[in-house]
Amino acid sequence: MGRRAFITGITGTELSAAEREFIVTERPWGFILFKRNVANPSQIAALNAELRTVLGDADAPILIDQEGGRVQRLGPPNWPVYPPGAAFGRLYDTDSALGLTAARLSARLIADDLIQTGVTVDCLPLADVPVAGADAVIGDRAYGTEPGKVAAIARAVTDGLEQGGILPVLKHIPGHGRATADTHFSLPVVDTLESVLEKTDFAAFQALADLPMAMTAHVVFSAVDAAHPATTSAKMIERVIRGFIGFQGLLMSDDVSMNALAGSIAERTRAAFAAGCDVVLHCNGKLDEMRQVARETPELSGKAMQRAQRALAARRPPRAFDRTAARAELDALIGQLGTGA
């Protein structure tokens, strides 16, 4: 039997019997971890090994959001703290080469942390371009407010992850920077002209269109589709994400349990697939919702299967790496800002 086109979360630090049965029966494409799933390095490595064993796929993708700053699922005392994306942007403004070096080093160190746990995919980099007055949900996670700068730093982050054997996920396509609400709680509507979006928000993603995977934004862009957020908008996916931006990799939804989306979990799942998402992401680990997602999810096939296969094939073994030297260099660079890491 083939795999189903969804990525699922789980409840805690160990698999329950019901979760094992769900994985065997429903055959998700991959898994995503959160702080609730993490106790210490040996526990998370054992959990990741068990997820793959139960699924019967030693190469099944396991994702995490490990950006640094506010969004860091692995943290002290077992893992170090990393700078937020804005720190690289500030350093870039002082010296662009140093900013890119710091971004690459941070991502390479994060990759080293992840690969040791069995995680193989990081939901990073961000290419969101914030504007004044936008909701703080992006805030200092962003690399800057100019699309060329954002794209350059995002590329450096991508390079660091890939050098460490970790696959990147570009987010939140086609842009979350203008959103005036947190999509965990409500649906943002962006009323900016499409011609302006193409030069700013969309432009940052266009420069990164070759990345293997991307995650959608639960944001309405009224100039293109006033009725649906990008995740569930066929117009946005075909005309903007696949069209203007030119992204041809695996397109996953952002978490369908977020309150920006309307309807039941089943309805949200159907809408995301109908719009053109290849894979649906469900994060909260609630088994009843996981079952709703699974019931509405087809097996991976056709173009979605090809994109998934290409994405996984893009992962390379980690390159040789001196962690101590890299951390010292990163700390010295960030120290120039007077912020510490």
Image: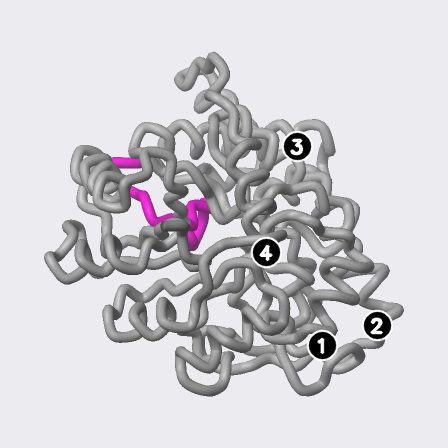
N-term-proximal mark, 3 vs 4? 3
How many angstroms separate mark 3 from mark 4 (CA)? 26 Å
Q: Name the residue under label 1.
A: 221
Q: What stretch is highlighted in magenta?
A: 65-79
How many angstroms separate mark 3 from mark 1 (CA)? 31 Å
- Badge number at residue 251: 4
Q: Name the residue under label 3.
A: 100
Amino acid residing under circle 4:
Leu
Q: Disc 2 vs disc 1: Cβ atoms closer than 8 Å?
A: yes
Choose top left, top right, bottom left or bottom right for residue 299: bottom left
Residue at 40 percent of width and 27 percent of height: 112
The x and y percentages for residue 198 are 83, 62
Would you say residue 73 sits in the magenta stretch?
Answer: yes
Residue at 71 percent of width and 77 percent of height: 221
Whether residue 244 can be seen here:
yes
N-term-proximal mark, 3 vs 1? 3
Residue 321 left/right relative to 203: left
* Viewer-side residue, 31 vs 139: 31
